[in-house]
Amino acid sequence: MQALPRPVLRLATNLPFVRTFSVAPAVMSAGDLGSAKPRGFMAEKDSFTKREAAHEGIYIKQLEMEKVERLRQKLKEQRKHMDELDKHL
């Protein structure tokens, strides 16, 4: 059997409810919200990516500082408890 070519469907363009469909995706420029994150060389040039990385770094640093502060507080409490035990002995 021979494959028959698909007929091209032509729609009347004068009808108001007929839309033409595009196969190309919407293109956003780098840095626009919702655009794909750039990879490789262009990732270094995107200011939004840099800002996002900086905010993430600040957030992680704050969490680590809170953990260190809690550990220091626990250490003080343990030291106080050890001093009380030494006095008791």
Image (tube, rainbow, N blue to C red):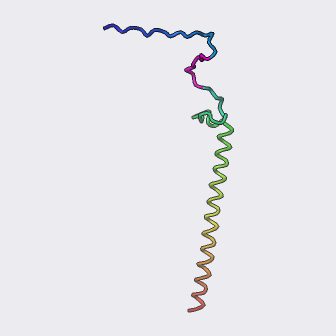
Q: How many marks?
A: 0
Of all residues, the one furthest to the bottom in this rendering is: 89
Judge whether 85 appears above or below 69 on screen. below
User: Which quadrant of the figure has residue 85?
Assistant: bottom right
Indicate the quadrant containing the C terminus: top left, top right, bottom left or bottom right: bottom right
Q: Position of residue 13 (x, y in %)?
A: 61, 10
Is 4 on the left-hand or right-hand side of 38?
A: left
Residue 30 located within the stretch drawn in magenta: no
Question: Is residue 67 depicted above or below 60 in this figure?
Answer: below
Q: Main secondary structure of the magenta part?
A: loop
Q: Kindly identify the residue that appears in the image at 57 percent across and 34 percent down.
A: 39
Which residue occupies the extreme left position in the image? 1
Magenta stretch bounds: 17-25
Q: Nearer the viewer, residue 41 or 27?
A: 27
* Quarter of the rendering occupied by the N terminus: top left
- Residue at image position (65%, 44%) is 52
Residue 56 pos. (x, y %): 64, 49
State which quadrant residue 6 falls in: top left
Most foreground residue, 24 or 19: 19
Residue 5 x/y as whole percent = 42, 8
Q: Is residue 86 above or below residue 49?
A: below
Residue 71 picture location, percent across and down: 60, 69
